[in-house]
């Protein structure tokens, strides 16, 4: 219950009343001096109010006040936007809305109500304060003004953040409606970034990286590879490539769905084709995107600069031990792995797996090298029995599904699915 003389700390009496991630620097008070007539906004620094109860930070409360204590993790839009809408609804026509905005390197960017007497420091409080990457010397304040009701004029002001943070009152500029404060980022700022080396590494583990560091540099820090390493089969994965793969798979799935919808209208009797397509859509949406990038680690270790790669946060290198198998996947009688034997061709390994099924696409068989590189050429003369250098340890032979012609590109999509599934299985083996 409100009583005359009540202040903010009379309601929020101690830190035990708020959650650990509460933003104590910006507590917002929605005020209605008259019921359902007008709305005002006041903010307060709750931490300063607790420390100095007699100071102006300990705001005097009025009847019908509503106090918002925000969480730094959950954002504020769901509470701030309705207040801004109230302010907009009560503003006279052709008048400036009492809002200001803050962006850039602050913890909670967004737009906030413009309070009476509000200054840059107050807007920084509303934005949750500076982030770790904030450039602390200066910020840019963009100011918009309507000149004679005819046109809008823009002015750019420089805010001396360093002086403001030192408590210099001259740097704490007053704000006007629509002011936009942009806190810049420190040049070349990067957060803590790391890569992971696993498998046959002398000292495997997670390594912090500096800007522009290459794979060869981190491998040297990790002591290089062990004697049992199989560099030709190294698996390098990147997070942003995995995200891009997921997007592409979803695009392919939607494309097949459109094709299926068209076939269901033009070819009512094509139930088998539609069933196959639906199965393919399911495969596309359940296939794990690995983000694998093909590298030639053996050439990198040999000192070829063109084979090196600049690292990014979250990269992973998995170096397996020596491999002696050739794997056969897809439309064969028995998908399995066989010990590599010098002189055996692709067709020999397929024969050792029982041969192809009736649904195999014999013209689009391809081989995935141990490093993830795909070798695919049409024609039965690609692998000749006289050749003894085509197959290598760690290779995988993929026999794709032969899809009906009404949607010719499905066969290419099945190859993508097989290839991604193979990559996922290889990465999961670690």
Image (spheres, rainbow, N blue to C red):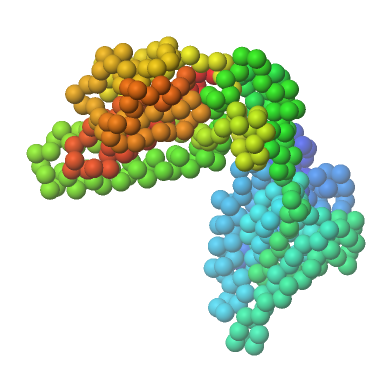
Side (left or right) of 146 relative to 89: right
Q: Please provide percent x and percent y for residue 24.
A: 75, 45
Q: Which residue is the extreme one toward the left?
A: 269
Q: Which residue is the extreme one toward the top?
A: 339
Q: State the residue in front, 105 or 248.
A: 248
Residue at image point 25% right, 30% down: 362
Side (left or right) of 200 relative to 10: left
Q: Residue 180: tell me if it is visible.
A: yes
Q: State the residue in front, 230 or 93.
A: 230
Q: State the residue in front, 52 or 33.
A: 52
Residue at image point 18% right, 43% down: 406
Q: Please provide percent x and percent y for residue 32.
A: 63, 61
Q: Please provide percent x and percent y for residue 246.
A: 44, 39
Residue at image point 70% right, 70% down: 142
| 277 w.r.t. 141: above or below | above
Q: State the residue in front, 285 or 358.
A: 358
Q: Please provide percent x and percent y for residue 82.
A: 55, 57
Q: Quadrant of residue 177?
A: bottom right
């Amino acid at each position: 219950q409100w009583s005359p003389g009540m202040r903010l700390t009379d309601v929020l009496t101690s830190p035990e009343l708020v959650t650990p991630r509460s933003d104590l620097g910006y507590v917002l008070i929605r005020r209605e001096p008259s019921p359902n007539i007008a709305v005002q906004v006041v903010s307060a620094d709750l931490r300063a109010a607790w420390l100095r109860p007699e100071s102006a930070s300990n705001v005097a409360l009025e009847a019908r006040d509503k106090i918002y204590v925000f969480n730094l993790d959950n954002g504020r839009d769901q509470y701030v936007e309705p207040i801004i809408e109230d302010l907009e609804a009560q503003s006279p026509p052709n008048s400036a809305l009492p809002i200001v905005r803050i962006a850039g390197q602050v913890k909670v960017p967004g737009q906030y109500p413009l309070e009476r007497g509000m200054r840059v420091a107050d807007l920084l409080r509303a934005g949750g304060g500076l982030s770790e990457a904030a450039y602390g010397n200066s910020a840019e304040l963009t100011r918009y003004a309507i000149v004679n009701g005819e046109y809008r004029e823009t002015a750019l002001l420089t805010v001396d953040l360093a002086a403001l943070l030192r408590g210099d009152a001259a740097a704490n500029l007053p704000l006007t409606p629509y002011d936009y404060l942009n806190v810049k980022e420190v040049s070349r700022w990067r957060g803590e970034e790391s890569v992971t080396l696993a498998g046959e590494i002398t000292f495997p583990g997670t390594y912090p990286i500096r800007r522009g560091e290459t794979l060869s540099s981190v491998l040297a820090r990790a002591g290089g590879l062990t004697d049992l390493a199989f560099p030709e089969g190294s698996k390098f994965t990147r997070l942003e490539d995995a995200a891009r793969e997921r997007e592409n798979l979803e695009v392919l799935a939607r494309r097949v769905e459109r094709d299926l919808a068209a076939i269901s209208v033009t070819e009512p009797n094509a139930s088998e084709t539609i069933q196959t397509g639906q199965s393919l859509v399911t495969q596309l949406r359940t296939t794990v995107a690995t983000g694998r990038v093909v590298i030639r680690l053996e050439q990198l270790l040999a000192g070829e600069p063109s084979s090196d790669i600049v690292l990014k946060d979250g990269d992973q290198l998995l170096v397996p031990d020596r491999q002696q198998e050739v794997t056969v996947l897809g439309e064969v009688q028995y998908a399995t792995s066989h010990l590599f034997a010098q002189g055996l061709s692709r067709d020999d390994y397929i024969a050792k797996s029982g041969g192809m099924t009736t649904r195999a696409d014999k013209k689009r068989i391809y081989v995935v090298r141990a490093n993830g590189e795909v070798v695919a050429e049409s024609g039965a003369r690609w692998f000749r029995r006289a050749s003894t250098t085509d197959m290598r340890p760690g290779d995988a032979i993929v026999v794709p599904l032969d899809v009906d012609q009404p949607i010719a590109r499905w066969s290419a999509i099945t190859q993508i699915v097989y290839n991604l599934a193979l990559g996922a299985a290889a990465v999961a083996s670690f």
